[in-house]
Image (tube, grey):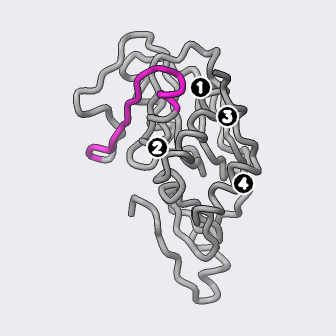
Amino acid sequence: MTTPAPPTERETLERYEKRGGLLRGHFRLTSGLHSDVYLQSALVLQHPEDAGALGEGLAAAFRDEGVQTVLAPAVGGIIVAHEVARALGVRALFTEREDGVMRLRRGFTLGAGERCLVVEDVITTGGSTREVVQCVEEHGGVVVGVGSLIDRSGGTAAFPVKRVALATLAATTYPPEFCPLCKTGSVAIKPGSRT
């Protein structure tokens, strides 16, 4: 059985559009920034065929990295980690915030030197991903790569390891105090998982 080719950037964004996961309006992102574009990955990942195809596509870029474990921040990255791990034949873990700090919980552990891939659904500033990387390193793991379905930073979220995104979206973001949408009287909404 041959492995299907990873989805192209266009195919990835088409999956988001088809499932209603690419929204336009006035949004407050997890980072606190405002934007006129919001990616609601849960609307895409609720469909196993989409989750599997995107996970397989992201996994393909890391097949030669010797990945032993795939990790993601809860909640948005859990399905991504699971599908990437399934495609690589390794286990999937997720981190959670406890007292404001990203931690491994639920009995999850890492071995010293364990080769880890950190994944996420959407990266905007890279803040949550960096927190997972730090958590892995604090547990003695080695981060060999960072992957996301969508990079909405336009490529500016940098990491000192191999970095792959299935699609890059250069969506404009604004600090709330400089948001032109707010200045018109529009109120930003937060459709994501964290308030």
Q: Which residue is mark 3?
A: 164
Q: For the residues marked 2 and 3, what is the alpha-carbon distance in whole angstroms?
A: 15 Å
The circle on residue 77 is: 2
Q: Earlier in the sequence, mark 4 or mark 2?
A: 2
Q: Where in the figure is residue 141, as x and y percent of width and height?
A: 43, 17
Q: CA distance from mark 1 to mark 4?
A: 20 Å
Report the front residue among 10 and 191.
10
Tell me the amino acid under the disc marked 1. Answer: Gly
Name the secondary structure under disc 2.
loop
Q: Is residue 67 magenta?
A: no
Distance between mark 3 and mark 1 Cα atoms: 8 Å
In the image, taking residue 34 as reference, residue 13 lies left or right, namely right
What residue sits 57% from the left and 44% below the top? 126
Q: Quadrant of the N terminus?
A: top right
Query: Which element carries disc 4, helix, strand or loop?
Result: loop
Residue type at the position of mark 2: Gly
C-alpha span from label 4 to label 3: 13 Å
Lower sequence index among marks 2 and 3 = 2
| Residue lying at 65% horizontally and 71% vertically, measured from the top left | 36
The reply to whether the C-beta atoms of the residues labelled 3 and 1 are less than 8 Å apart is yes
Crowding at mark 1 (Cα within 10 Å: few <14, some 14-19, many 20+): many
Question: Which of the two discs, 1 and 4, labels the residue nearer the N terminus?
Answer: 1
For the view shown, which residue lies furthest in the front direction?
A: 1
